[in-house]
Amino acid sequence: MDNLPIFLGIRGKKVVVDGGETVAARRVERALSAGAHVEVFDPAPGQEVELLLDHPNVTHHARLPTRDDISGALVVWGASEDDDRDDRLYQWTREEGCLANIADRPELCDFITPSIVDRSPVLIAISTGGASPVVGRTLRARIEANVPPLFGRLAEFTGSFRDRIAAVIKDGRERRHFWERMIDGPAGDFFIAGDENRARKQIESDLAQAGQAKPMGEVYLVGAGPGDPDLLTFRALRLMQRADVVLYDRLIGDEILSLVRRDAERIYVGKAPSNHTMLQEDISALMVKLAKEGNRVLRLKGGDPFIFGRGGEEIEALAEAGIGFQVVPGITAAAGCGAYAGIPLTHRDHAQACVMVTAHGRGGVLGLDWNVLVRPGQTVAVYMGLSSLDALVEGFEDRGVDMSTPVAVIENGTRPDQTVVTGTLSDIDDKVDAARLKGPAMIIVGSVVTLRDKLNWGRDDEVHAMSLAPARALDL
């Protein structure tokens, strides 16, 4: 983080804006909206600034500023777009101890003026650190479309219950849960729909029942996909922000983990081949224990929890203990890795079916139904098979499969460091050894791999511009 995000109180404070055109007008408007007394300096202001000069909190000086003019100002905006004029103004702010922002001169800025989404008293500020204001404006437009206009009024409405909620619910965590249920639940929905009376009755009813018994927690079993945080579902993101405790595995990267609520406790329960930090039974028992203590527990798993993620075993334990749970599907590794490598799992001319198998069973034993795997006209996607690649190749060879059958091994699929090694059953083992892949990796076997040369969208310059991470290809 290059800048400290803060909201500065300038109500009733002196703010100076030096300039008379569009850039200056936007600064004057921003300062006035926050209640400042604004002094504008420009000998001949343009129409946009002139329209603001009649405001009771604006004083216009039809001249250039001097050092004495900025004395006592909390914030000084340089918006003249004249380098010499801006340089003088900035030097005066150093001598007078003012916060300065000189338009389009990042080196002369103590702060950045962000794009904002105003749902007062809710205010969302967006900054790119000056690197790309257009990105900030684009993000602002997306947020504007997704935050209801009444959201600010909802904050005021629910805020009127603050003292009563604090008096009724003493425990801090339970109080936060009540607030979340109030805003995200029926009361918030009623208010956003325009029925304030019904929203008030709902809150009164919820308060009457609050504190009568310590509520049981719940578990969110969330699939985080194969690695790219852009592949998370909206529901996954919402639940990631609600959790009190997060249990995560080794497939969860820092970018995804950073989207979890900051004050949530994080517990690593990752498992690697032959190196289990926690046994599966212990993970399930921990989830039950934490939920019984009243926590909202996020079990964050790579890929999809119900596809080789042992999610079924975990919710069996929860159901037996009477713990409530939700399951959020994620994009499974075969689909994500295949898509980012330009390899479709099915194709009318190549494969009419896809078989997903794992090279690890209970106890880590490789046990596969080869009669299913060697059928023609299908793709075989092998999870957790990197350490068993030689045994997989031998299995196909022993059953008479053509050793020129194409194979792809995709390491760190969908992530910026994605690596794809392609070959055939006859040489893929040697190529993977040469590439020194360490995993996690997905193995795809079938003629669909030949489509990669044509469909590998991840290496096109146009896709680079869309900020999609290309594969590092090792087509040896």
Image (spheres, helix red, strand yellow):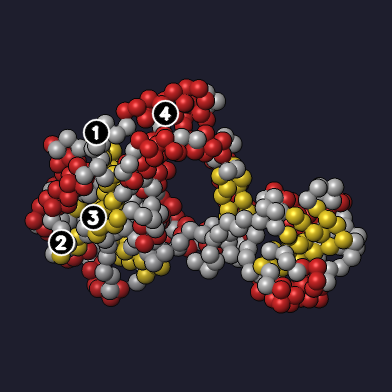
| Callout 1: SS | loop
Pick the front one: 11 or 356: 11
* Coordinates of residue 308 in the picture (x, y in percent): 21, 49
* Mark 3: amino acid: Tyr
* Mark 4: amino acid: Ile
Pick the front one: 279 or 37: 37
- The CA span between labels 3 and 2 is 18 Å
Badge 3 or badge 4: first in the primary sequence? 4
Pick the front one: 136 or 443: 136
| Callout 2: SS | strand
- In the shown orientation, is residue 326 left or right of residue 463? left
Q: Which residue is mark 4?
A: 203
- Which is closer to the viewer, label 3 or label 1? 1
Q: Which residue is mark 3?
A: 383
Q: Residue at x 89, y 65 (%)?
A: 63
Badge 3 local density, few (<14 within 10 Å), some, or many (20+)?
many
Q: Which mark is residue 276?
A: 2
